[in-house]
Image (spheres, helix red, strand yellow):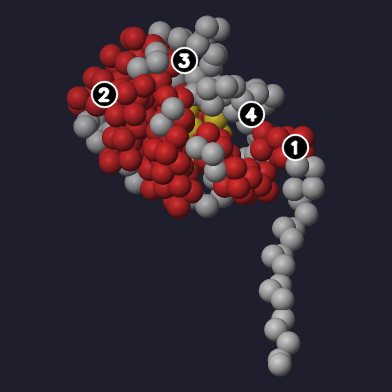
Amino acid sequence: MRHKTHKERVRIAIMVASEKRGCQISENFTIYRTRRRSRFQTILIPPVSMNKFFCYLSHSAAVMMLMASIAMADSANSSFNQGFEKHRRGDLKSALQRYSSAIEDNPSFSMAYQMRGIAQQQLKKYAEAISDYSQVITTGDNSFKVIGYYNRGVVKNMIGDFVGAILDFSQAIELDKKMAAAFFHRGIAKGKTGDLTGRMEDFRQAALLGELNAERWLNTYFPDWKQPPKPPPSPPSENPA
């Protein structure tokens, strides 16, 4: 039986993201609804059913990863492919070992750091996940940096570091100003810090960019959110003496 190529594996992963419409956001901020037309895809492979697998990938990042894989050392690429397959099957510990082997062979392998971070996150090793996402930011180009900032922000939200999460989501938005999910999750973090005005602004921007959870929340609690904001009242005019 012919083994799937690295390119084929990534296509399968992105297909998984596209098919998993209808997933609802959870309390720990790790599960997202996906849309076929959205620019960014969320890969969901549930840990128990071996189908929940979180990875935030832009199309451009996927393309960059595929291009980079052509130039990678065979050993690093092979280890990554093995880890990816273990990961898809829910064998997280074995996946970690193979991703680590890939990183040993190629210390600048951004996607291996990204996938190892995801596995660490699924195993609730949050400090290790943050470290790996930081390496994605350090080793990757902008296509990977935006993913690294976003995923690191998600983990910080999960552990209660809402100020740190806001900074990371802001960095992701700086790199991609149309990243709806970053606005949405920054809004969640702002709400946790008591910045309700900031939460409203971020949720509104996320909804305008197509984030369905933000739109649903706004429709429920602020049904007039689509109306342009009212201008501030004019200062009273001073009558000359």
Q: Residue 223 falls in which quadrant of the image?
A: top right
Q: Which residue is mark 2?
A: 102
The vertical placement of 151 against 27, above or below, is below
Instruction: Name, please, the residue furthest toward the bottom.
Output: 241
Sequence order check, earlier mark of 4 and 3: 4
Q: Identify which amino acid the numbered label 2 is placed on.
A: Ala
Gap in angstroms between the C-alphas marked 1 and 2? 47 Å
Gap in angstroms between the C-alphas marked 1 and 4? 20 Å
The label number, if any, that marks residue 88 in the structure image: 3
Q: CB atoms at circles 1 and 4 under 8 Å apart? A: no
The vertical placement of 37 against 233, above or below, is above
Q: Within 10 angstroms of label 1, few (less than 14), some, or many (20 or more) residues? A: few
Whole-percent x, y for residue 142 in the image: 38, 48
225 or 209, which lies in front? Answer: 225
Q: Is 119 left, or right, of 187 in this rendering?
A: left
Q: Which residue is mark 1?
A: 221
Residue at 65% across, 23% down = 24
Q: Which residue is mark 4?
A: 33
Can residue 19 be spotted in the picture?
A: no
The vertical placement of 25 against 239, above or below, is above
Front of the two marks 3 and 1: 1
